[in-house]
Amino acid sequence: MAMILTLCVAPVAARPRKPPVTQLSPAEKLTEQGLQALGDKDYSRAYAALSEAFRLHPSAEGLLYLGRLAAAEQRTLEAQDLLRRYLLDPARKPDDALQQLATSLLAGATPPSGRAIVLADPGALVSVDERLVGVLPLPSPLLLSPGEHRLAIEYPNKRLAAQVTISAGRQFEVRFDRSTGTLLQSLMPAVLTVNELGTTLPEVLGEINTTIEQSVRAVDQTVLPQDQALFSAPHLRDCISKPSCQQLLAQKVDVEYILHASLRRFEKGDGYSLKLAVRHRDIADPAAAEEAKCPRCTPAEVVTLLGRTLPTLLVGALKRRTSTLTVATQPVSAEVLSGKVRLGMTPLRRILWADPIQLTVHAPGYRPVHTEVTLPPSQPLALDLSLEPLAQTVVRKEKPKTPVYRRWWLWTGVGVAAAAVATGLCIGLIPSTHDNVGWLP
């Protein structure tokens, strides 16, 4: 009899698989070491690790970690520059926690600074004063403190470095030529912005600043905020709302145009009146000005109105051309007027809009000269005038006649004559000899 053996095998529980060991890349290992050193406040070791990690694998997150380190070292401007470019980097990974961290570290006023646009072949690492700050192309200009800086870009087989000079509030273009190893630095034209809109609408100040910057960039200019410009002339801070003071500041920081934006609430009812003016630093009359009323507007609608009005105003203002007028006269120190506006005394040299103007030149004792001139665009116009003297009128002043009886010299003469007659009579009565004179006994 055949025996059938049946083997019953109990089911064996499946063992959990071990997760595969994650192999950290060299850049990730260095990042962990750098963050650990940052937590230990060993800032030199933290920078060495984090910068080397960025060299191996440039990333937006690498900018964030370098920004955290700069903030811990109280390098405020460097931290703001790195964190701002982290937030603007389109390649950064979505991470609400990291974004909130960067935003919180960015809070606070920006120290005096200028901007540098770095242009060169993509892929180069960028460092400022031997500290790594990014990789080309940069999503936005570098923020640099005013003064001298050593700017360098590094390729795998080549390093280019040069000194750059930064001015507060100004934007520069720094172009490296990889083939020749040369650097070209150029100062970009700017508009001094006196923005008073935030005083009335602080809740939309960020949107206002963005709208102004976009409008100014559309006319190939950069924005120079008044706060940055006033670092060069702090004594003008108290008068900055006056056009003449704004022109002095523009001359100090070497920009041609000023944008003045102000806002007024309606006294009755809801709404605002938006006033915009674009001025040249050397000309009293504005290049362009406009007042736009916005009844029953919300703050957001005011920003929309600004974005709709400002670009057209800037285009019209910057299209106007200037001319230089010089006036010489004989005699000198004659006063020159354009309409009712006083231009100054001769010899005179003034920059004016290239338009027809009515000139009046006058000096005391001379006939005034009235003339109309048309100033040629971008060219000087010289006037040499000889003023005609006024006709001289001679006025004779006669003394009042003295009555005859009051004239001393007449009576003196009469007295002298009378004395002479009396003397003559006396002499005539005296005989020449005594012979014929009968004397009384």
Image (cartoon, grey):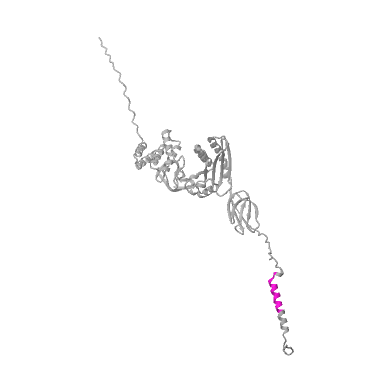
Which quarter of the rendered picture does the C terminus lie within?
bottom right
Asked whether 78 or 306 is in front, the reply is 306
Asked whether 89 or 286 is in front, the reply is 286
SS assignment for the magenta stretch, majority: helix
Whether residue 335 can be seen here:
yes
The image quadrant that residue 5 belongs to is: top left
Which quarter of the rendered picture does the N terminus lie within?
top left
Considering only vertical position in the picture, is 36 above or below 431? above
Asked whether 148 or 55 is in front, the reply is 148
Considering only vertical position in the picture, is 353 above or below 393? above
Is residue 311 shown left or right of residue 109? right
Residue 414 among those drawn in magenta: yes
**Residues in magenta?**
406-420
The image quadrant that residue 334 belongs to is: bottom right
Indicate the position of residue 268 as horizontal and vertical percent values: 58, 36
Q: Residue lying at the far front in this picture: please name it.
A: 441
Asked whether 313 or 133 is in front, the reply is 313
Indicate the position of residue 163 as horizontal and vertical percent values: 43, 49
Considering only vertical position in the picture, is 298 above or below 361? above
Residue 238 among those drawn in magenta: no
Indicate the position of residue 369 as horizontal and vertical percent values: 65, 55
Is residue 25 shown left or right of residue 429? left
Q: Residue lying at the far top in this picture: please name it.
A: 1
How many marks the image carries: the answer is 0
Indicate the position of residue 207 as horizontal and vertical percent values: 50, 37
Whether residue 169 can be seen here:
no
Considering only vertical position in the picture, is 395 above or below 166? below
